[in-house]
Image (cartoon, rainbow, N blue to C red):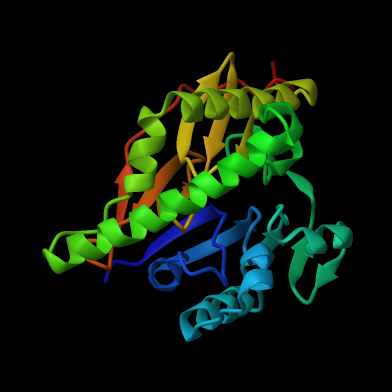
């Protein structure tokens, strides 16, 4: 098992307590990674799902204990609650043990770039078309996950590796692409107003690194569909990594590189 070191790791949308959480995959990722700073970018515990049906398998418990263990062994852990774990937002600015709770944060990379870090639910009203459309989207997403679950059970039965059908469909549904584009623009506009170089977020379960009018956009994805994370290496480069579902013991890196955006304060 290859062990890797990252200066910073961003993960979000784990949804512990929900039946679609890939806790086993995440636990393997954390166990084979040494991390300097770990950002938990919201929706770590799915209180929405647990309010409908309480579910807490041992693997979910192990993930929570692993995060607590990391915070007590020298890894700086910053927790930014999202909409599914919204009750924790009231503790903005406080610390629980060795874990700092913040609604938003600013991360400075090794090469001096400043990035806004937030879950992204702050832009829901701006991105969505109203409560009815949001409800339709929520019900549609539940159906999508149901199909994704059975699709991958079939693939497992056929001896094939995990594949995110939900992620594939998002790329090919016009309405989904439009919502993702609006969300990306909203995140980047917030970073631009704060005169920052970029943004790191989650929320929409769509991992991506791109450039939006000179602002670096990073979405760390999720551990429901994509099983992805953002990582910063010792040179300050930020990449998307995906859990290699087929082998179960390694990380596959998606090679996406951005041109370095000059540090505005240094310019």
Out of 266 and 9, give the one closest to the viewer: 9
Relative to 145, is 247 above or below? below
Splitting the image into 4 quarters, where does residue 161 fall?
bottom left
- Residue 140: give x, y in percent of width and height: 50, 45
Q: Is residue 196 visible?
A: no
Residue placed at 42% from the left, 43% from the top? 240
Query: Residue at the location (56% across, 79% down)?
Result: 55
Q: Residue 236's spot in the image, x, y percent?
A: 52, 40
Residue farthest left in this picture = 158
222 left or right, relative to 1: right
Q: Residue at x 79, y 26 (%)?
A: 194
Q: Where residue 78 sits in the image (x, y, percent)?
A: 70, 59
| Residue 45 visible somewhere in the drawing | yes
Q: Residue at x 87, y 64 (%)?
A: 94
Extreme residue in the bottom direction? 58
Give the total number of marks visible in the rendering. Answer: 0
Name the spot of residue 238 as percent of width and height, x first. Answer: 48, 40
In the picture, measured across the screen, residue 181 lies left or right of residue 249, that is right
Quarter occupied by the C terminus: top right
The N terminus sits in image quarter: bottom left
């Amino acid at each position: 098992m290859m062990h890797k070191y990252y200066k910073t790791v961003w993960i979000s949308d784990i949804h512990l307590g929900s039946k679609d959480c890939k806790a086993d995959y995440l636990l393997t990722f954390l166990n084979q990674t040494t991390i300097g700073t770990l950002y938990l970018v919201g929706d770590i515990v799915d209180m929405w799902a647990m309010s409908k049906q309480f579910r807490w398998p041992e693997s979910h418990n192990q993930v929570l204990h692993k995060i607590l263990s990391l915070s007590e062994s020298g890894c700086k852990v910053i927790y930014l609650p999202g909409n599914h774990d919204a009750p924790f937002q009231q503790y903005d600015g406080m610390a629980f043990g060795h874990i700092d709770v913040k609604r938003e944060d600013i991360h400075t990379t090794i090469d001096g770039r400043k990035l806004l870090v937030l879950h992204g639910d702050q832009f829901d009203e701006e991105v969505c078309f109203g409560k009815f459309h949001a409800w339709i989207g929520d019900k549609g997403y539940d159906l999508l996950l149901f199909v994704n679950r059975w699709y991958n059970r079939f693939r497992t039965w056929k001896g094939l590796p995990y594949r995110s059908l939900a992620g594939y469909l998002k790329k090919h549904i016009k309405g989904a692409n439009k919502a993702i584009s609006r969300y990306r623009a909203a995140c980047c506009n917030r970073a631009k107003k704060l005169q920052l170089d970029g943004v790191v977020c989650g929320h929409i379960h769509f991992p991506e690194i791109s450039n939006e009018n000179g602002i670096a956009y990073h979405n760390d994805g999720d551990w429901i569909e994509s099983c992805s994370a953002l990582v910063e290496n010792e040179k300050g480069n930020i990449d998307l990594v995906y859990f290699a579902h087929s082998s179960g013991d390694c990380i596959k890196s998606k090679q996406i590189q951005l041109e370095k955006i000059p540090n505005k304060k240094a310019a």
